[in-house]
């Protein structure tokens, strides 16, 4: 009980979630095909789209089931914004699509596993492309048949179609088991509460650096600070506001002890207020001459804010992969 009280965003419900589970009003079913490190299927499992992993900061190396929506109060706030009626429509659409697409997803999973196992084969790529195109055709037909229902819940078909297409190709092209996610820009056409319905509120499909999701340096209900490799540095995923500015400042300050430039991946940043921007700029100013704070994947609105306040030309601050490049 003490541990549950310690983490207000802990998922308190038994898992795996059974068919017909409705104890949590914000529950959103999602199915996935589990696999071992060799991509051997371990069966199809049912989970919640909002379920993730939280890090027990007081006991390093211990984790707990975390709801991405936050604690009970925040889950209900999200539900009120989305509306229970719209969520019921989304649940029905998801269930219908799961039943329709299951055989196609299983064939696609097998082809993807063969592609990434053993030596490269010219025969595997055409097979995979054929299966992907067939799967996307099924999706197109489903979206067309249910266009009005999708629009009723704030999910217009055309941007949703493009989002799914990018997700599918990102998934089949990577050998990693992690599910690809998206950055904020493709989601700007959707209302913010609806983005959590898509399960795409944090990590982008292609990030500036490989993030170590299992080793978060900090996590709250809206932000994760993660170490990255290639290049080594930090990633900010989620929202930066006054509630977590101090954690961002501390994480950046610790990076000053490393040699060379400090790399900061911002491609998963959904929101950053002026205070967060000041923290990033001050971290660059605190570096010794010759060292830089290098910003990767900076959101276009944040880059624009830097230009407005004339902070972009600072000698210790560098922006790579900018939208204006």
Image: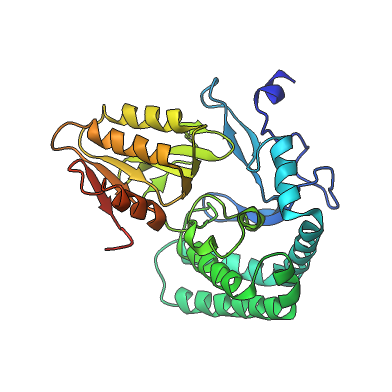
Q: Which residue is drawn at 66% across and 22% down?
A: 6
Task: Name, please, the residue furthest toward the front.
Answer: 309
Q: Residue 108, can we see it? A: yes
Closer-to-camera residue (317/209): 317
Residue at (35% x, 55% y) in the render: 304
Where 169 falls versus 309 (above or below)? below
Across and down, in percent, residue 195 comes to 61, 56
Task: Identify the residue shown where x is 74% and y is 52%.
Answer: 28
Looking at the picture, how far across and down is residue 193, in whole percent?
A: 65, 53
In the image, residue 252 lies at what x, y percent? 34, 32
* Picture quadrant where residue 94 is located: bottom right
> Quarter holding the N terminus?
top right
Closest to the observer, 115 or 48: 48
For the C terminus, the image quarter is: bottom left
Q: How many numbered circles are shown?
A: 0
Q: Foreground residue, 182 or 128?
A: 182
> For residue 253, which quarter of the picture?
top left
Left or right of residue 49: residue 282: left
- The colour scheme is rainbow
Q: Is residue 299 above or below residue 244?
A: below
* Above or below 64: residue 240: below
Q: Is residue 187 left or right of residue 103?
A: left
Whether residue 227 is visible to the viewer of this picture, yes or no, is no
Residue shown at the point (26%, 26%) measured from the top left = 257
Instruction: Tell me residue 7's x, y (percent).
Output: 65, 27
């Amino acid at each position: 009980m003490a541990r549950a009280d310690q983490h207000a965003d802990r998922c308190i419900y038994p898992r795996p979630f059974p068919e017909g589970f409705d104890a949590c009003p914000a529950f959103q079913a999602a199915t996935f095909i589990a696999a071992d490190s060799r991509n051997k299927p371990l069966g199809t499992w049912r989970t919640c789209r909002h379920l993730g992993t939280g890090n027990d900061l007081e006991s390093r190396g211990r984790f707990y089931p975390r709801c991405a929506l936050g604690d009970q109060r925040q889950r209900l706030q999200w539900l009120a914004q989305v509306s229970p009626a719209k969520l019921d429509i989304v649940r029905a659409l998801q269930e219908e699509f799961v039943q329709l697409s299951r055989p196609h997803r299983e064939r696609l999973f097998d082809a993807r596993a063969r592609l990434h196992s053993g030596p490269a084969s010219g025969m595997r790529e055409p097979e995979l492309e054929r299966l992907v195109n067939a799967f996307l055709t099924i999706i197109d037909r489903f979206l067309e048949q249910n266009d009005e229902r999708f629009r009723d819940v704030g999910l217009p078909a055309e941007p949703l179609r493009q989002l799914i297409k990018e997700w599918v190709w990102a998934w089949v092209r990577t050998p990693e088991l992690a599910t690809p996610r998206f950055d904020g820009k493709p989601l700007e056409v959707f209302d913010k509460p609806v983005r959590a319905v898509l399960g795409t509120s944090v990590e982008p499909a292609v990030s500036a650096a490989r993030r170590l999701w299992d080793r978060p340096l900090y996590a709250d209900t809206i932000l994760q600070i993660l170490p990255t490799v290639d290049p080594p540095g930090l990633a900010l995923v989620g929202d930066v506001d006054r509630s977590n500015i101090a954690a961002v400042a501390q994480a950046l300050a610790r990076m000053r002890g490393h040699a060379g430039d400090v790399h900061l991946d911002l491609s998963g940043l959904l929101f950053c207020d002026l205070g967060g921007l000041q923290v990033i700029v001050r971290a660059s100013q605190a570096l010794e001459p010759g060292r830089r704070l290098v910003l990767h994947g900076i959101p276009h609105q944040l880059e624009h804010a830097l230009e407005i306040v004339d902070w972009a030309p600072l000698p210790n601050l560098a922006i790579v992969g900018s939208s204006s490049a």
